[in-house]
Image (cartoon, rainbow, N blue to C red):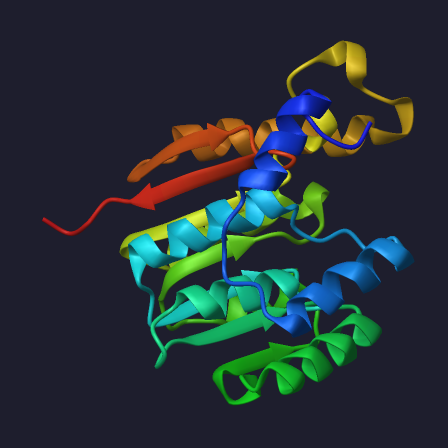
Amino acid sequence: MDAINRTYIEEYLRKMAAYPCSEVMKAMRRSAEQEGIPILRPAAASLLDVLVRAVKPLVALEIGTSIGFSSLVILNAMPHEGRLVTVDSDEDRIKQARSNFAAEGILDRVTLINKDAGEVLHYLSDPFDFIFLDGPKAQYINYLPDCVRLLKAGGMLVSDDVLFYGMVADNALVRRRKITIVKRMRKFLNALMAQPGLHTTIVPIGDGMSVSIKEADR
């Protein structure tokens, strides 16, 4: 079970996906597929690219760097003066990401933090125009208060993999060893949808993305 959409829809979306994809990013995708490292599917990357371009953030936060593929999607869509802060607790992945950023020539626009996001978020104070949440799925509910606090008025929060192989939407799909993650993701989505000052929708692309806009100051 690799996708939430039917195979022919997923394949069509993959073919139609359009976003800046450098030779470095193409090599990253090949490597990720060979090593079994999960990265954004093309359709999800295309959606993320469009959302970042709509917001035009000057400063963005990413929770869950991995090898840096989604980081590059975000940076390529930001204004050239835009900067990204990205957090991941996996030291090896952070090293890979740093190498990929250097190869892409954008290392000077990135701040990499190799710590647990749950610890880091509490200490961040400067607001962000755009936040991409793609860390440990069971922790989304714990990250939400700080994500809302750190998001600027008028800013956007995008959360990845929120349908979790369709299990979040259908109990019949839930695997026993994934019950805790599914319960916490459902709790996260319920809290996100009910969050005062946020307007949220869920898009069935990739493994599901939620898109939230924080109300602008009036």
- Quadrant of the image containing the N terminus: top right
Horizontal side, residue 140 vs residue 35: left or right: left
Quarter location, residue 209: top right
Horizontal side, residue 4 vs residue 196: left or right: right
Q: Which residue does the image show at 48% across and 71% down from the upper left? A: 124
Quarter location, residue 151: bottom left
What is the x, y in percent for residue 165? 73, 29
- Vertical placement of 56 versus 5: above or below? below
Q: Which residue does the image show at 31% across and 53% down from the upper left? A: 54
Q: Which residue does the image show at 40% across and 59% down from the upper left? A: 130
- Vertical placement of 46 versus 68: above or below? above
What is the x, y in percent for residue 217? 15, 52
Outermost residue on the left side: it is 218
Q: Which residue does the image show at 65% across and 67% down from the upper left? A: 25
Q: Does residue 66 show up?
A: no
Outermost residue on the top side: it is 172
